[in-house]
Structure formats: structure tokens, C-alpha cells
Image: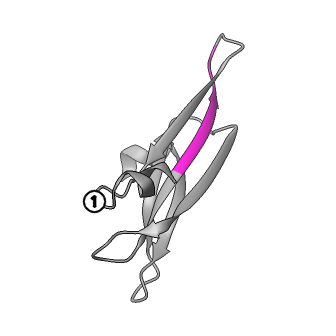
Amino acid sequence: MNELKNHVFRIATSFLYRSDHSHTGVATVAVTSSLSADGFITYETEPVMRTPKATLACRYRLVDSSEDLLVINIHVINVAGFDAFQN
């Protein structure tokens, strides 16, 4: 993990494991801090595990530009049908 010590981690937690309180969800790793980071979890859950899914939206400043970059990291429910995905 030494190669990642100068990186910035943003995480949207879906849930914590009871045994060791470790996080599960989605993470975005970058070499710079984000301007903003917003996490969301789904109302719908995976059919088998009954766990929610997480989404993370991070906004970054682009070098030598007046525009920002929006990065959206999505862990979608892939077996719940279109309605769950659309929600």
C-alpha cells in the first residue's frame, strides 16, 4: 500500500460488516483532493444478500481549465430489473 500513501481516498459506504466494522461500498482514489464528494445508497437491495448498493459522485478541478470533472462511481444492482436501476 506504500504506493498509495500520497493518494486521496473517497468512499461511499453501503454497509459495515458486524464482525470487524470494515466498510463495503465504492471508492474513488485520486492524486488530488476533490472539490466535493457525495455518497448515496440505494433504497432497493440485492435480491440474494439484501444489501444496498452505493454511488459516489466526486468533482475535481481540471488543471489549466475553468471547467470541473465530475466522476461518478456506481455499484449497481444488476439483477433487480430496470425500475430499481432507474430509481
Closer to us: 78 or 21 = 78
- In the displayed structure, 46 sits above or below 66; it is below
Q: Which residues are magenta?
A: 56-63
Q: Is residue 51 magenta?
A: no
Q: Residue furthest bottom?
A: 19
Other-residue count near label 1 (Cα within 10 Å), few / some / many at <14 / 14–19 / ≥20? few
The residue that disc 1 covers is 79
Residue appearing at x 44%, y 75% in the figure: 22
**Secondary structure beneath label 1:** loop
Residue appearing at x 46%, y 44% in the figure: 73
Q: Residue furthest top?
A: 64
Closer to us: 2 or 77 = 77
Q: Position of residue 4 (x, y in %)?
A: 42, 46
Q: Is residue 60 left or right of residue 28?
A: right
Residue appearing at x 64%, y 39% in the figure: 34
Q: Position of residue 85 (x, y in %)?
A: 42, 52
Q: Position of residue 87 (x, y in %)?
A: 52, 54
Q: Is residue 63 left or right of residue 55?
A: right
